[in-house]
Image (cartoon, rainbow, N blue to C red):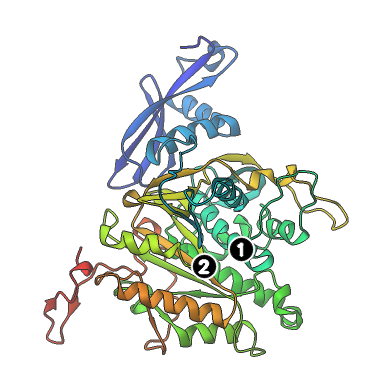
Amino acid sequence: MSPNCLHITVEVASSPDTGVLGFFSHGPVLSPICSISGYSSFSCLVPVPVPDLAKLGLNRGAKFWKDRIRRFTMDGSWTAAVMRRIHERVVGSSRAAPISSSSDVWLLGVCYNFDESESSPLAFEQDFSSRILMTYRRGFDLIEGGDSKFTSDVNWGCMIRSSQMLVAQGLLFHRLGRSWRRPVDKSCGLEQEYVEILRLFGDSEAAVFSIHNLIEAGKGYNLAAGSWVGPYAMCRSWETLVCKQREAEGAAEAARELNDQPLPMAVYIVSGDENGERGGAPVVCIEDASRHCLEFSRGRVDWTPILLLVPLVLGLEELNPRYIPSLRATFTFPQSVGIMGGKPGVSTYIIGVQDENAIYLDPHQVQPVVDLSRNDSEVVDSDATASYHCNVIRHIPLDTIDPSLAIGFYCRDKDDFDDFCLRASKLADESNGAPLFTVTAETQNVSRPPSQSGDGLGDNAGDQNNEDVDADGSAHEEDDWQLL
């Protein structure tokens, strides 16, 4: 143990009243400093380098230590080390995970078979590293949350970052196509449309899809700085943000070409019965999708590009294994833009599968804010956007992911949507009574956002774990998958 380091034990333990708390302790002092919902109980030793331990006042009281430890957590590099150790204990090691050469890899609708072509491993790596990565950032414009003020989303922003990645991927496919790859040669210029996509997700109120604006739009769903919400609330927050952005633009937005809008596609949150608050598998209604497109275009065209977000709860404490084959199959859809999911309290962005493993991008790396808000005449080079990409391939077993998740699909036009519906219907028919979602032609209940109450960690949108009830009030099992 280094004489110039104070080794602080990080305790993470559950509590029935407060959820799961992260504790930093030294000796007899135990100071709770942050909420990290969903972690198992464990502890790890984290070194804090200091020039002189005597300056810390080792004999001081609990209040002194609480203040001191809070100051330590404001240091980005140290916080990154703590969060990485916690994350590795929950999700697994951050080291590059080997990809098997004996089975297919599906990455957002594209299949890579390493046996058939020597170029497949390289092609896969280029595809993976071209996906947009959003991570924790430090040093951004102030966000107020309760009694605290935040300039970093460390410890609480992973679900927001996962959702940003999913939407950014949809924009990337729309603007540049699924075959776009980030240039390997740094001397090559970056496409302006690619840079504009990244600017939309900058960490300031000026960026349309920033963490600041998402938090403001999601207040009705208990989305707040310093807190964590589930995938359903995150999806509804995106829906609200897009609507508010269009309302704020007003006449200017109406006159603008559809493809020139920040998000040039309709957003359709696919819910189950009772507005997504329990009631079986969500239903993709073709009539509802058409209505969303018509409203998005303000009646100018019958169909537009559309982003479907499908929040699901596929189990109680653990993912019901009956859903795993269907989850895996969604990555074979050309329309796939991935899944917001991970382990409890540790959201990641899942972009592919191989065998029983989910391949994901990890938002839990802490990086400084990048300012891309330059004049169009200035060239943004490859180094400036390097933090938005990753070549470290990570995976977790599919059967260990949190049952609360959200799947995304991007359909470019009506033909693409029809193809999606055919694939989704076929998948539901082959699900052995456990469909992720179903497809119908006409709406049966008007689909509206539910009362704006946050789902937090008890997110139950699309909950597929309920009993059917007969007219006489007696329960029966239509499908045993509903009971878990």
Q: Mark 2 or 1 closer to N-term?
A: 1
Badge number at residue 178: 1
Q: Secondary structure at mark 1?
A: loop
Q: Nearer the viewer, residue 26 or 241?
A: 241
Say how many tags the image has. Answer: 2
Residue drawn 38% across and 87% down?
445
Q: CA distance from mark 2 to mark 1?
A: 9 Å
Question: Could you say where residue 130 lies in the image, as x and y percent from the top left?
Answer: 62, 51
Residue drawn 11% across and 80% down?
474
Q: Residues within 10 Å of mark 1 (few under 14, many from 20)?
A: some
Q: Secondary structure at mark 2?
A: loop
Of the residues shown, which amino acid type is indicated by label 2? Pro
Of the residues shown, which amino acid type is indicated by label 1? Arg
Badge number at residue 334: 2
Q: Nearer the viewer, residue 272 or 479?
A: 479
Does residue 231 appear left or right of residue 316 in this picture?
right
Badge number at residue 53: none
Question: Could you say where residue 443 lies in the image, as x and y percent from the top left?
Answer: 41, 88
